[in-house]
Image (tube, helix red, strand yellow):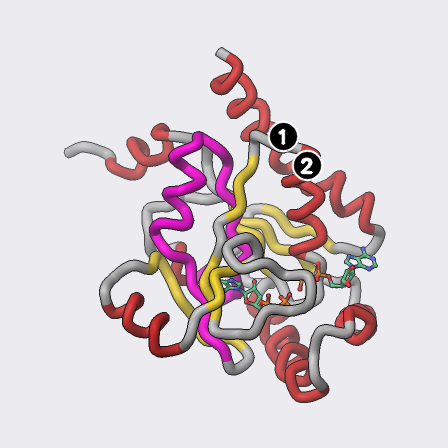
Amino acid sequence: MRDHTKEKAMAGPRPVVMSGPSGAGKSTLLKKLLKEFDGVFGFSVSHTTRSPRPGEEDGKDYHYVTREVMQADVAKGEFLENAEFSGNMYGTSKAAVQAVQAKNLICILDIDMQGVKNIKRTDLNPIYVSIQPPSMETLEKRLRDRKTESEESLQKRLHAAKVDMEISKEPGLFDVLIINDDLDLAYGKLKDALLEEIQKVRDTNNS
Ligand SMILES: Nc1nc2c(ncn2[C@@H]2O[C@H](COP(=O)(O)OP(=O)(O)O)[C@@H](O)[C@H]2O)c(=O)[nH]1
Ligand SMILES: Nc1ncnc2c1ncn2[C@@H]1O[C@H](COP(=O)(O)OP(=O)(O)O)[C@@H](O)[C@H]1O
């Protein structure tokens, strides 16, 4: 029998899933990575029903859609995975991942814990990275200082964070666990974890 998992994995670089509680620093870390390694990584732009925050761009940070549109597209089978988080729908479309992989880039997915569990059932075969805050107190402070959430949204995120931090301890769920205390140290650890894949892309794209 042919080994399709291997075939897929050999088709291009392995994607990277970044997960962890809201406020742990996923966006901050992945934006640094995309900036430093331009032409190596590409971001999988998710769909969401939440409103854009100031500074966020449609088609860059997310595709902002209504629940009706998103539900219809999910029903049509256009999504690799989707989840409900803090009262909104989020999902990775197949097209979002294909757009990055078509350029032979390492596709980065920023997804929640439900997304991680659902991606495990696909043949994407990514490297799973968990970004965790040093403590609940630090997480709450960072989320408050970010000033993007209402009190209600903040409380929902803190509740989801507690659940996320518990589930993250499950052995084998993640390949890499990074505690984002000092940003530069955390970023260094992330780069170390991805160095082999980065080198592969550079070798392939330069040859
Ligand atoms: N399952 C899934 N989760 C997603 C997706 N896009 C974003 N998320 C997650 O949804 C959560 C909320 O994201 P967001 O509203 O941007 O808030 P933030 O994490 O506080 O910056 C985070 O845990 C994201 O990782 C997606 O396509 N699928
Ligand atoms: N190591 C760090 N030290 C201090 N503040 C941080 C650190 N990492 C991220 N932050 C800040 O914490 C907030 C949450 O980070 P963000 O990247 O938005 O998290 P996430 O994408 O996981 O929700 C942001 O305001 C960000 O600037």
Q: Is residue 67 above or below residue 177?
A: below
Image marks 2 and 1: residues in contact by CB distance under 8 Å: yes
Furthest residue in direction left, as rendered = 1
Q: Quarter for ligand 2? A: bottom right
> Is the CB–ligand 2 distance for label 2 below 8 Å?
no
Give the residues drawn in magenta, as a range.
88-117
Secondary structure beneath label 2: helix
Residue 174 seen in the current view: no
Question: Which is more toward the observer, 123 or 107?
Answer: 107
Q: Is residue 9 above or below residue 180?
A: above
Q: Residues within 10 Å of mark 2 (few under 14, many from 20)?
A: some
Which residue appears at 36% of the width and 70% of the height? Answer: 70
Image quadrant in which you'd find residue 3: top left
Which residue appears at 35% of the width and 30% of the height? Answer: 11
Which residue appears at 57% of the width and 30% of the height? Answer: 39
> The residue under label 2 is which amino acid type?
Lys
Q: Is residue 205 above or below residue 197?
A: above
> The residue under label 1 is which amino acid type?
Leu
> Is the CB–ligand 2 distance for label 1 below 8 Å?
no
Residue 192 seen in the current view: yes
Q: Position of residue 93 (x, y in %)?
A: 37, 56
Image quadrant in which you'd find residue 180: bottom right
Residue 181 painted magenta: no
Q: Which mark is residue 191?
A: 2
Residue 95 painted magenta: yes
Mark 2 and mark 1: span between their CA atoms? 6 Å
Furthest residue in direction top, as rendered = 207
Q: Quadrant of the N terminus?
A: top left
Which residue appears at 65% of the width and 51% of the height? Answer: 177
Q: Which mark is residue 195?
A: 1
Q: Position of residue 166 (x, y in %)?
A: 61, 71
